[in-house]
Every structure is written in C-alpha cells, then in structure tokens.
Image: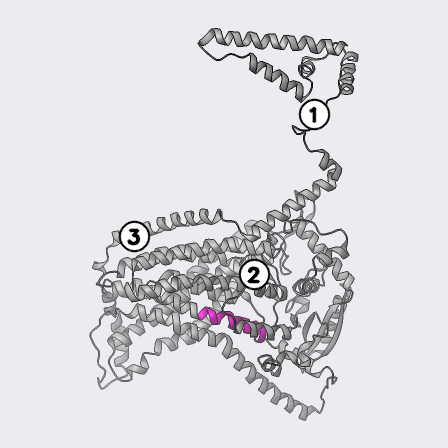
C-alpha cells in the first residue's frame, strides 16, 4: 500500500510511478482457474473479443492466481467516431439542444473530449453486447466468470491535488464539481453536489435548533414546524437544482438513453409497432407477477428485523429498568452485542435476497434494475435505522406499564443463574430521557462509528492483508523457487496496479443510502433533540472529505457513468419529508408540554386529538409544498437560461439553413417609412391581369383595388374623419354618418375605375 501512503504525503504527486498511467484506459483482472487448459482457452477468448472491437491489449503478471490485461483504444480515430456517434445520439434523444458540427475536427475543437467521456465509451466497448457493437464481456458471469474485475486506473496527481484542496476549503464551488464530473462522471458529481447542497442548507436548521435547545427545549411545536418547512424547501429546491446542473453539464434527459442489461433474459423477439424493428420482448405481466413478491418481502423484513429489535428492546428494558443484580453495568451492553453481531448478518441476507428478487424481475435496462433494487434496500434500511426510535416513542413511552408482565419472562430466566436467590430487582418506571439518549446516539455516536467503519476499518484491513500476502508470497517463493520479475521501469507502476486491483468497487448508492438515512433522522425525530441538525452539519463537513478520500484511496476508480439526477433516491427523500410531517407532529402531541409523555399509561393518550393533529399536519405539509413549489417555479436559473439560449440559437440556425440568410432578411415586413412601395408599373400590371381574366375580376379582387398603397389609405381615412359629425342624438346622426361614408366610397370607386381604364 505504499502508493496510497505516498498519496497522502505532500510530495505524493511528484513520484514518478504516480505521474503516468502508461496510456492505459482499463485493466482487466483475469483469475486463473486450476485447470490450465480452461484458463488458456478463456484468456484467448478474452483477447480476441477485445481485439475485434478495436482495443489493444498487453498482459502482465498479477499474482499467483491472476494476470492483468491492460487495455487501450488501438485507434484514436475510431474512438473519435464512437464519441461523435454518441453526441449525435444525444441530440436525437433531446439531451443536446443542437446537433454536433458536421465537421468532426471542428466539433472536437469546439467541445473537447473529457477524460470521463473517453473512459465511459471505452468501458461500453468492452461490456456492451456483441449485437450492439461491444465485446460483451461481463465480469463474473457466464463465459467470463474468470474475469474478476474491469477498472480504470486512478490519476494520483489529480487525487493528491483534490484531497489537498478540499482539506483547506469550507465550501465547494462549481469548479470543484466540474473537476469531479470530468474525472469520475456525472453520477459521482451529482452525489457530491447533493451532499454540498444538503450541507449548506443545514445551517438554517442548525442555528434554529440551537436556539430552540436553549429557549424552547425539546418537543417544541415551533421547532417541528420550522424543521418540516425546511425539509419541504430543501426537497423542492434540490429538484430544481438538479435540473439546473443537468443542463449545465449537458446531460438533461440523458436518462432517456437506456443501456441494456447483459443479464436480461428476453422471452421472444417481436416487431416494434412504431419503428418496425425486431426488439427483445419480455411480457410485462410476467414481470408484474414477480414484482408482487415485494409485498411478502417487505412483510418478511418487518417480521424478521422487528422480532430481533423487539427481543433486544425487551432485554434492554429489563436490564436497565428492572434488573438490579450483579454485573448490571456490564450486562446492559448485552442488547448492543446481540444487535451488532446478528443485525449485519440479517441485513446482508435480506440485501442478498433483494438482489436475487430484483434479478428475477428481469429488467431490460440498468436504470430500471437499479431503481427496483433501491426500493427494496430502502425498505430494509428504513426498518433497521428507525425501528428503535419508533418502539421507544410509540410503544415504550405510551404502553410501558403494560409491558411489565412480559418482562417477568426475563426475570425467571435470570433467576436460574442465581440459585442462591442473590438477584434483586427494582420497581419498573418509565425513563423519560430514553428517547433523548437514543437520539443523541444516532446523531453523534453512530455517525462517528460509521466514519470509522467506512474508512478506518477498510484501511486497516488492507494493511493487514498486505502483510499476510507478503508473508505467503515469500513462503511460496522459497518452496517453488520461481519468481516472476517485473521490468525495472515498470516495477513500481505494476505494483500500484496490483494494489488497485485489490480495492473494493466504489458504489455511489452506498453513500446515497447513508445520506438519505441521515435525512430521515432529521425530518422524523429531530424534535426529540433540537441539536440534531447541528450534529449532522459538523458530521457532513467531514463526510464530504472522507468520501473524497474513500474514492481516491480506498476504492477502485469508479466508472464515469452519466446521470441527470440522483435517481430513485429522490423519491426516498420526498417520502421521508412527507413522513416527517406526520411523525414529528405525533411526537410533539404525545410528549409536548410539562408532562413530557403519557408516562407508560395508554389512558393518557388522546387518540382523537392525535389523529386530528396528524391529519392537520399532513394537509399543512401538502399546502406548504404547493406554495413552495409554485414560488420556486417562478424563479429562473443559469441552467434554464442556458437551455433557452441554446434552443433559440438552434432554431435560428435551422431557419437560416432552410430558408437562407437572404430570405430571412427579405421576410421583414414593410414599415411606415418604406410603405408598400406600389408603383405605376405595378398598378398597370395588376389592371392588365384583371382585363385578361374572365369578367372584370372577382368581388374579393375589386375590394382590394379601391385604395392603392399606404398613402391613399391614409388620405381617405383622414377625409372620412373630417366629414364625420359629433354624436348629438340617436338615429339621425347615425344615418348621416352612413350616408357620408357611402358617398365617399362611391366617389373613390368611380375614381379608381376611371384611373384603371386610363
């Protein structure tokens, strides 16, 4: 891990092995199975598949059971054609406002290729199905089961500068986000943009929460209302902000371009009724029947995880509120030990089952598959994260006294370990500070533990595994006597690549999940402890930097996927914002006031008042959401202005190309200064046309020949005005006016006919 240690030093970017990636686009880690014939056959298929799609390859030794295949595009001209085709596709799907320049060279001069764009296109060449022009290589699947991973190499010079810059800045700006986008793609950039916006928005609830903690105390109705209003404003503002970012980054509506899943199992091919093309078809009803399994899946999650929490909850209540025997201070950690040991296993099993269920739903595109998986993971996280607080707020505090008979089970069990009857108990009483203690744990302690589990523990594991592998390599070398040496000029570079190959794959969904869960704590339960927003504000400052370090040092470089939003996590935020208005109002109703809760007696709960409060809070939330959405909709943004500007320029260019510049200028209508420019030649031509036609012209034609030109129209109009009389009384004045107009029309008609004959 020397390369990673060097990265964190001030001169890490100056090391020679960190300066270059040898023009490598991707590295493929190929696992060598025990059967050498099978290994050689699979390796030959791999190299041939890469070569067929225009990729050059080099192979180097990985470790005792793998080789590393280095991949790059053999022809930059071929890559340029692929990028140009993608940009043209973007225009056809409405991602770009205008088509790229027809001159390819000029197109790339006006819009240079970013590193993320290049890496994304190369990855698609490697993984796309063969019928779509790719090599069809899918790691750990089918004939490619020996392909362990496909990953790009880190740019350690950029990573070092990135970490140093962020460690000295309080806020991120547009340049920082653009740099992330150019290196890691819009998907990762959207996460950091969301986290930065979330962090900036937290200053308001943090300040108000601190004031509420000093003045109002906990369970404040005013704080709950302000917190709910904040969640609405942030949610609606972010929906507008992500559209703005998508326009600025040129990925608006990019979700319309769906990448097919290689594991999609189509039922049959059918002709598309619109395009007439043969498309792979899977019956929607068949998928719907599989999706119905989500209902028993959610029920199973509630039953399994709920049973575990209820059991640990009962044990905790007994040990903290009833038990008063030996080792009490140590035994109180029993529920935590049980949850810490069993909950991760159960969560992993349920997550694996969710992955299998989503796979069975057989989505055709990657985005649809991800959305289906996120919905299931959100259900699991909702139960695992918020169940303890739900049990304390809506079971323990209102119905605690009714739990006492059931706690006798734990009392009888405990007495079996004390045959001398030395165990003592105490009278059960509701602990009014239990909710606050839990909230402090989730807002402070759990955040610190999460940072340690997310960053420190993986680092220590890598260091330990590195030492173990070093010992095993020396032992194997002493036994076999064969060591594969690297070329001196490549040794440090190859060692860095081998280190990166052992890192975990970065999944931005994990970071989104963490922030969405935190948002839930803030909207649902922060009225219990008003300092919650302040705690999260401090945590998220470090979270921004630790997530950057996790990408730069703790995981493989992510594939630079494009995205136009935060995806299905936006729906999760909206649900938590809405649920927060209900839960926080219920908590304030139950625990607000001097009594601070029902005290374990359900008779103290006013059910009708509780339901009315929840109903009123929901309607107030919906009304506030409508007002905020309307107000934000009236605001303009740089991204939308840019989009309108680009579309206007595109329409103007299209008209000029279609009609020509001269036609565009000639289409200007006459002005009062220029008039209609009717000449004697024009009048004679019109009279000649009418005289040669059948009859003397239609009434419609004669109607428009009574006045020739703007000047004559003005003269007759002035004459009519001068001959008009003020209105005195009724009918005689109207008749006189009609007579005057009739005389004027007849005079002009006669004069026009005479002029035409002459």
Label annotation for residue 374:
none
- The residue that label 1 is drawn on is 676
Instruction: Mark yes or no: residue 588 visible.
Output: yes
The residues bearing labels 2 and 3 have C-alpha atoms spaced at a distance of 42 Å
Is 85 situated above or below 431? above
| The N terminus, quarter of image | bottom right
Is 479 situated above or below 19? below
- The residue that label 3 is drawn on is 613
Give coordinates of residue 569: x percent, y percent. Answer: 50, 59
- Quick one: SS at disc 3? helix
The residues bearing labels 1 and 3 have C-alpha atoms spaced at a distance of 72 Å
Mark toward the start of the polypeptide (1 vs 3): 3
Q: Main secondary structure of the magenta part?
A: helix
Q: Residues within 10 Å of mark 1 (few under 14, many from 20)?
A: some
> Residue at 57% of width from left, 83% of height from top?
465
Q: Can residue 548 be found in the magenta stretch?
A: yes
> Residue at 72% of width from left, 73% of height from top?
70
- Quick one: SS at disc 2? helix
Q: Can residue 5 be found in the magenta stretch?
A: no
- Quick one: SS at disc 1? loop
Q: Is residue 551 left or right of residue 310?
A: right
Which of discs 1 and 3 lies nearer the camera? The answer is: 1
> Residue at 63% of width from left, 20% of height from top?
714
Q: Residues within 10 Å of mark 3 (few under 14, many from 20)?
A: some
First to last magenta residue range? 539-557
């Amino acid at each position: 891990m020397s390369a990673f240690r060097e990265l964190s030093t001030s001169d890490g970017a100056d090391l020679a092995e960190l300066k270059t990636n040898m023009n490598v686009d991707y590295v493929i880690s190929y696992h060598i199975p025990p059967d050498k014939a099978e290994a050689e056959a699979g390796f030959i298929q791999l190299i041939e598949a890469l070569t067929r799609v225009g990729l050059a390859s080099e192979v180097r030794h990985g470790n005792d059971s793998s080789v590393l295949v280095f991949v790059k595009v053999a022809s930059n001209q071929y890559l340029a054609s692929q990028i140009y085709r993608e940009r043209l596709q973007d225009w056809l799907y409405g991602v770009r406002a205008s088509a790229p320049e027809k001159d390819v060279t000029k197109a790339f001069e006006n819009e240079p290729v970013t590193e993320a764009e290049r890496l994304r296109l190369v990855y698609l060449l490697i993984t796309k199905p063969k019928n779509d022009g790719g090599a069809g290589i899918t790691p750990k699947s089918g004939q490619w089961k020996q392909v362990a991973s496909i990953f790009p190499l880190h740019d350690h010079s950029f990573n070092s500068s990135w970490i140093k810059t962020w460690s000295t800045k309080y806020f991120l700006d547009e340049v920082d986000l653009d740099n992330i986008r150019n290196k890691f793609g819009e998907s990762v950039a959207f996460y950091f943009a969301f986290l930065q916006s979330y962090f900036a928005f937290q200053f308001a609830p943090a300040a108000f929460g601190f004031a509420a903690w000093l003045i109002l105390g906990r369970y404040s109705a005013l704080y709950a209302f302000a917190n709910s209003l904040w969640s609405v404003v942030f949610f609606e503002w972010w929906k507008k902000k992500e559209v703005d970012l998508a326009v600025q980054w040129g990925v608006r509506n990019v979700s319309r371009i769906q990448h097919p899943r290689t594991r999609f199992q189509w039922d049959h091919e059918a002709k598309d009724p619109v395009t007439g093309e043969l498309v792979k078809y899977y019956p929607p009803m068949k998928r719907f029947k599989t999706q119905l399994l989500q209902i028993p899946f959610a029920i199973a999650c509630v039953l399994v995880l709920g049973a575990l929490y209820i059991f640990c909850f009962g044990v905790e209540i007994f040990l903290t509120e009833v038990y008063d025997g030996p080792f009490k201070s140590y035994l109180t950690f029993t529920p935590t030990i049980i949850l810490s040991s069993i909950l991760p296993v159960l969560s992993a099993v349920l997550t694996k089952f969710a992955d299998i269920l989503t796979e069975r739903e057989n989505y055709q595109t990657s985005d649809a598959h991800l959305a289906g998986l996120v919905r299931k993971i959100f259900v699991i996280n909702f139960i695992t994260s918020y169940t303890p607080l739900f049990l304390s707020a809506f079971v323990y505090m209102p119905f605690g006294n009714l739990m006492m008979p059931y706690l006798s089970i734990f009392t009888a069990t405990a007495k079996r370990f004390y045959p001398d009857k030395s165990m003592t108990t105490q009278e059960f009483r509701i602990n009014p500070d239990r909710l606050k203690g839990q909230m402090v744990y989730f807002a402070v302690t759990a955040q610190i533990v999460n940072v340690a589990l997310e960053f420190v523990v993986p680092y220590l594991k890598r260091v330990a595994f590195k030492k173990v592998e070093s010992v095993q390599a020396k032992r194997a070398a002493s036994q076999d006597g064969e060591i594969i040496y690297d070329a001196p000029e490549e040794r440090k570079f190859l060692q860095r690549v081998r280190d990166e190959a052992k890192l975990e794959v970065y999944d931005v969904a994990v970071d989104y999940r963490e922030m969405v869960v935190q948002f839930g704590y803030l909207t649902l339960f922060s009225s219990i402890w008003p300092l919650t927003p302040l705690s999260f504000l401090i945590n998220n400052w470090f979270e921004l930097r630790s997530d950057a370090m996790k990408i730069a040092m703790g995981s493989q470089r992510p594939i630079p996927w494009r995205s136009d939003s935060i995806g299905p996590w936006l729906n999760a935020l909206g649900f938590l914002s809405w649920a927060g208005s209900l839960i926080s109002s219920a908590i304030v109703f139950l625990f607000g006031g001097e009594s601070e809760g029902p005290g374990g007696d359900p008779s103290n709960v006013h059910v009708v008042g509780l339901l009315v409060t929840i109903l009123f809070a929901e309607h107030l939330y919906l009304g506030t959401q409508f007002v905020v959405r309307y107000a934000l909709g009236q605001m303009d943004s740089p991204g939308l202005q840019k989009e309108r500007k680009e579309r206007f320029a595109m329409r103007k260019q299209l008209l000029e190309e279609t009609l020509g510049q001269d036609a565009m200028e000639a289409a200007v209508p006459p002005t009062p200064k220029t008039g209609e420019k009717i000449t004697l030649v024009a009048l004679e031509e019109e009279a000649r046309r009418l005289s040669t036609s059948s009859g003397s012209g239609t009434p419609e034609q004669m109607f428009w020949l009574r006045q020739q030109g703007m000047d004559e129209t003005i003269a007759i109009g002035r004459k009519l005005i001068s001959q008009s009389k003020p209105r005195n009384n009724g009918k005689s004045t109207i008749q006189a006016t009609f007579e005057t107009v009739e005389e004027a029309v007849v005079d002009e008609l006669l004069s026009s006919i005479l002029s035409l004959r002459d």
